Image (spheres, rainbow, N blue to C red):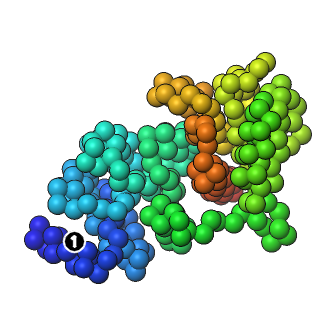
């Protein structure tokens, strides 16, 4: 314990950011520490119990958390962290091999700042950490391909001023399609395949919650990230949105940076999941 406390003091003197990484696999603990040691002071914990031992004398800048662990898994761990005012402000990134959309949505809905899938790129993990620890200095990731093509994003809202505001907030990084009539969404999606959809909740004819299950019936959009944007942000409202297939939630009035961050995060994760599915198909085929 004295060695760990000395390490904490040394990190503070050197002004190095402190990160607790929780994983029950020793190899993963060693690998992540070796890949991040040039940037941060890493404190490994082989269990959630060990994490809390570290938290008794260490205030980390961030926690990296695996999902599948014996006794207490990552989901239960983040619930307990976010329920405790001593730790609720510490950002948590899930670093895990669970690569299905439901696991990603659950992790983010429980309060994770990001979700990084193993095997991971050290560069991408550092970018994720820096975007959280230094949001004002972080340079947003560009999704443009070599030909300058941007990811396509569909935004649906019956209020024209809100549509224009979201289009303006996103247009530097994405090609934004806008629809003001919810009844036009399905026809649009049968001919176009945006990488992400932003849906208003309260709309005439079909609201956002009506549309999500309908969108999920289209084979090409079963996995497309959907962000609900609404004036209602109660826990029950958010839970219902997630349970019917939403990927995330933003409360109006929205902040342009929050919208950009969430759209970018979900497009990155969606592309990672798609690559994993393609790699698995190749292995099977």
The one nearer the camera, 30 or 210, is 210
| Residue farthest toward the top in the current orientation of the protein | 205
Residue 193 seen in the figure = no
Q: How far across and how far down the image is residue 177, in percent?
A: 83, 45
- Compared with residue 164, is residue 285 higher up or lower down, i.e. above or below? below
Residue 195 seen in the figure = yes
Q: Quadrant of residue 172?
A: bottom right
Q: Which residue is mark 1?
A: 8
| Lateral position of residue 209 relative to residue 78, left or right | right
Residue at the spot 73% in from the left edge and 60% down from the top edge: 173
| Residue farthest toward the left in the current orientation of the protein | 2
SS under mark 1: helix
- Compared with residue 93, is residue 155 higher up or lower down, i.e. above or below? above
Residue at the spot 25% in from the left edge and 48% down from the top edge: 86
Residue at the spot 25% in from the left edge and 55% down from the top edge: 51
Q: Quadrant of residue 230?
A: top right
- Compared with residue 167, is residue 25 higher up or lower down, i.e. above or below? below
The one nearer the camera, 84 or 49, is 84
């Amino acid at each position: 314990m004295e060695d760990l406390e000395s390490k904490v003091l040394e990190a503070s003197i050197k002004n190095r950011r402190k990160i607790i990484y929780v994983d029950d696999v020793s190899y993963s603990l060693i690998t992540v520490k070796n890949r991040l040691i040039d940037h941060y002071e890493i404190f490994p914990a082989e269990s959630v119990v060990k994490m809390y031992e570290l938290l008794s004398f260490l205030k980390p800048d961030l926690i990296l958390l695996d999902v599948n662990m014996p006794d207490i898994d990552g989901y239960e761990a983040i619930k307990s962290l976010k329920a405790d005012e001593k730790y609720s402000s510490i950002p948590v990134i899930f670093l895990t091999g669970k690569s299905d959309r439901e696991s990603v949505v659950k992790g983010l809905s429980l309060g994770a700042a990001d979700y990084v899938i193993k095997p991971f790129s050290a560069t991408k993990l550092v970018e994720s950490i820096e975007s959280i620890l230094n949001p004002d200095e972080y340079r947003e990731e560009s999704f443009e391909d070599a030909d300058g093509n941007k990811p396509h994003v569909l935004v649906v809202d019956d209020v024209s001023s809100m549509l224009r505001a979201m289009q303006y907030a996103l247009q530097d990084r994405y090609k934004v399609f806008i629809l003001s009539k919810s009844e036009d969404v399905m026809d649009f999606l049968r001919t176009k395949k945006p990488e992400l959809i932003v849906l208003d909740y309260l709309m005439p004819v079909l609201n956002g919650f009506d549309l999500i299950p309908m969108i999920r019936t289209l084979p090409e959009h079963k996995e497309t990230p959907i962000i609900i944007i609404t004036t209602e942000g109660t826990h029950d409202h958010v839970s219902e949105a997630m349970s019917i297939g939403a990927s995330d939630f933003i409360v109006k009035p929205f902040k342009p940076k929050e919208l950009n961050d969430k759209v970018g995060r979900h497009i990155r994760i969606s592309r990672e999941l798609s690559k994993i599915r393609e790699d698995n198909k190749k292995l099977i085929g």
